[in-house]
Amino acid sequence: MRRSGCLLAVLLLLAVGCSRSGLRDAGDLTASQLEAAGQSRCSVVKDPDKPLIVEWSGMDAAELEARLLRGVVAVRYEDCAMEVLRGCTAPGHYSYAQTTTGSQSIHIGSLDELLINIPLGLAQLGGRVERGEALELDMVVVGRYEAPRPAYTAAELSGGPECARATHVVTGVSLGAFRLSSVEDSARNGGGAAFSGASEDTIEVLKESPPNMLEACAQVAAADDPRRNVCTAPIRLEVAPISAHAEALAGPQQFLRPPDLDKREVQSMDLSGSLAAHQAYDVAVKVQADRRATPERHTEAWCTLAAIEQDNPYLTQAREQCDRWRDHTSALRQSEARMILDYDNLRVLLELRGVPVAAQERAAASFLVTHSSLSADAYPRIRAVQRASRRLGRGDRTSLPSFSTAAAGEPPPVDSQIGRSLIDRRSYRKAISVGFQPRWIPQGYALGGTVLGRVNYVHEVGFEVAYAQYAGYGPRWRYILAMARYERVYRPHKVFRPYVGASFGALIPIGPMTCAQGPQPCAAPAGVMTVNGGARVSLTPWLSLVAQGFAGAMTARPFFVGGVSGGIEFTIPTGRDWPQ
């Protein structure tokens, strides 16, 4: 039996001899044996650029998971041995993509099968296989991390002297759950029973990640349940050699940054050319400089110029810009669609009380890393996940609003990343509103106006000044009403927009100052506080009709104040909300 085992090792490793030291009864392979086999052992690897890492220790796997969230990982990968270089990274971040569920079981009964399937595990697992043990690997793959580019150059790496040792960059990671078990093969050790039917076979689970989750991950993934995001153990890496040349291929992520117009390419007017080309070029340059123009508008402007082929001195530049903006628009819309799908899945995941908070936090962090190329200022879903991630980091359970609720609280703003046609826009993100809103109270009225500053669509803070008369006690008292107010707006992007708020201020008498029936009915200063509730009907983003009711208290008779008000309001956008 010793000879047959030695012959098998010779045929498969081509370098391990038949000495007693080369085939021990216990222990792992020695360093000298690995070095002796180094010239040939990687030649039989099934796919050297996609090694399994199921044999990695829990500490190494956890460190890799943390590194994947920080940036593109650089490694040293030689002779079927891999070392993660802690201080070295490549530019960009990984994006997460759900995949079609894949379950696989691998039986490893010999050293060549170990080399073919788990080349990085030869040192840790080779001794077990030599002793006659068989390995069983069960895997469920539910998703993957993908680097923004398929290749990188050595000049792009950053992190100090460690980068000089880098040979590869991790461009993909398969995620899921796995279980690696060792089975005592009685047939190979003289037991005489087949592997599958030997009652004396013993099974030892060497590693399982996540613990006790293999079957659960397989069932959840098969049902397309968002809980499969819990199954995020790294199973297989995809690596690409680091190129020494600057011609490393660029992936689709490069198009997520809007193209710039090189000012050096701007040509002066050539009156010999087509007047239509000059006019189209003038439009394209203006659109390029407009930060509020959508990607579709940029594409239309440059492609219109590129379509003018006769007497067009800008044809080459127009074609280049047209192609760039088409790529950018396509990549951006695809990223938005993936982000919306991932948000909906994450929202359901956070509602599942059976999922640990730590797993929910990892899923939220994965979402933010995946969609880091999209601006949080432009997408309310990303801001909602950022808030949820902070709460999960404190150990608190939380939830995400549905899209309709998120839009009601924070509708998608319009900037260079979102087309105007995608939303019904009835409000500005930041604005100043000026309104004329008379108040009617029992035995009195107030005529004045309001000035409100709007922040983030839903918060409005400002003041109100009005001339008021009250005839409840004898002479008609006259006042100046000055109040500060706050409002919280709901459904801000809709035509009908309710709000609630509060006001506080003072009534300042301006006459008459004589008392009518004694000291109490005298016109005197009074503090006022009210609770307000009402709604706006937005005819346009800048014009609204307003109606509200209010009730509260004051520090002078009659001590209670209440009534209704209504009027018209004009809204002036501020900052980037100026319309085109």
Image: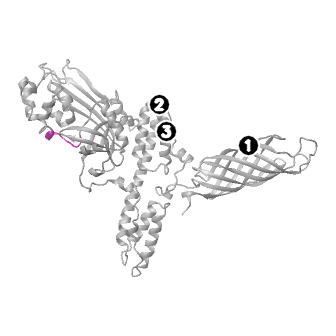
Contact? badges 1 and 3 (CB < 8 Å): no
Under tag 3, what secondary structure?
helix
Q: How far apart are marks 2 and 1 (CA)?
A: 41 Å
| Crowd class of label 3 (few under 14; some 14 to 19; many from 20; radius 10 Å) | many
Under tag 1, what secondary structure?
strand
- Type of residue at label 1? Thr
Q: Looking at the rendered structure, which numbered label has been put on residue 130?
A: none
Q: Mark 3 points at which residue?
A: 388
Sequence-wise, the earlier of marks 2 and 3 is 2
Q: Name the residue under label 1.
A: 530
Q: Mark 2 points at which residue?
A: 353
Q: Is the magenta stretch mostly helix, strand or loop?
A: loop
In which quadrant is the C terminus drawn? bottom right
Q: Can residue 131 be seen in this view?
A: yes
- Where residue 95 sits, quadrant-wise, is top left
| Crowd class of label 2 (few under 14; some 14 to 19; many from 20; radius 10 Å) | few
- Type of residue at label 3? Ala
Structure colour scheme: one colour
Q: In this view, does 461 lie above or below 14?
A: below
* Stretch in magenta: 42-50
Q: Where is residue 31 in the image (x, y as percent from the top left)?
A: 16, 30
Sequence-wise, the earlier of marks 1 and 3 is 3
Classify residue 295 as left or right of residue 80: right
